[in-house]
Amino acid sequence: MRLGLGLAALGRPAYINVGRSELPPSRSVAAMRDASWAVLDAAYAAGVRWVDVARSYGLAEEFLAGWLDSRAPSGVTVSSKWGYAYVGGWRLDAAVHEEKSHTLDRFRTQWTESTALLGDRLALYQVHSLTPDSPLFDDLALQDALAALPVRVGFSTSGPEQASVVRRALALERHGKPVFTAVQSTWNLLEPSAGPALAEAHAAGAHVLVKEALANGRLAVEPPEPVAALAKSLDVGPDAVALAAVLAQPWADTVLSGAAGTHQLASNLAAESVPHAALPELAEAPADYWKHRSDLAWA
């Protein structure tokens, strides 16, 4: 199965994602842990074998580590990310929820934290939200440290310049070897601009993960009319149609569901059986899309 599970919506009480009504009302640590485990159980039973977390996803790494210890599942690939730190204090109304730093010190600290929880189950470690202004591009010591990791190394991207970042980062080499062999980018029906660069990455042998396939929930909660009409005709949710559009891209190796509950997960998984159908052009200008995303409330 090419669908994987991302725990961004389940590891912390607030996230920039619409349509999280399936989360526990209390959003307590215990309740969110139970919700995470329920989704992980359902995903594994359905055949999902890739789980993606990050240091900034609140307690997502801890929740996942506990589930792995309890269930001892086989064949699960775990990816995580460093670069952002969660600073929200487990509050819905925090003024700041995460803080970004692409420095060697932040990498060393978070690598230690991630491996303390996930150990040798961690298969891919990614720079979180690489953008054109990241100091990583000029920090050779950081690049050397990444290249020396005993796991696969990748990066995620955000913003209207994703395509250029993908090409620039995958071109980085240290001592004759590429620094990165995986990339995780946003691609969806509203923001497909990174597609050509991701196709090039896949063709060059990089593992391509797709995040935010539902545009932070927008394509599920307020789908464009063509998506809603096709979903109705196929008797599936608009989320399944949107995810199916990503699965139709031959370069998309792993497509992440960000389900906030088991019902959302089941609806997402229906994408596996949705036939690919042509949809009219729905893309927004990248700058407009990312402005809309930045304006979403943490809730």
Image (cartoon, helix red, strand yellow):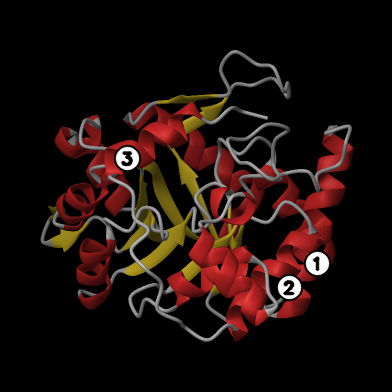
Q: Position of residue 235 (x, y in %)?
A: 70, 78
Q: Is residue 50 visible?
A: no
Outermost residue, left side: 176
Q: CA distance from mark 3 to mark 2?
A: 31 Å
Q: CA distance from mark 3 to mark 1?
A: 33 Å
- Of the numbered discs 3 and 1, the one sitting upstream in the chain is 1
- Residue at (27%, 55%) from the top-left corner? 193
- Residue at (22%, 30%) from the top-left corner? 135
Q: Is residue 13 above or below residue 158?
A: above
Tell me the residue that label 2 is attached to: 44
- Residue at (61%, 63%) from the top-left corner? 239
In the picture, the disc for residue 41 is 1
Q: Amino acid at mark 3?
A: Gly
Q: Quadrant of the N terminus?
A: bottom right
Mark 1 falls on what kind of element?
Answer: helix
Q: Is residue 235 above or below residue 65?
A: below
Q: Is residue 91 above or below residue 106?
A: above
Tell me the residue that label 3 is attached to: 159
Q: Amino acid at mark 2?
A: Tyr
Q: Quadrant of the C terminus?
A: top right
- Residue at (49%, 59%) from the top-left corner? 213
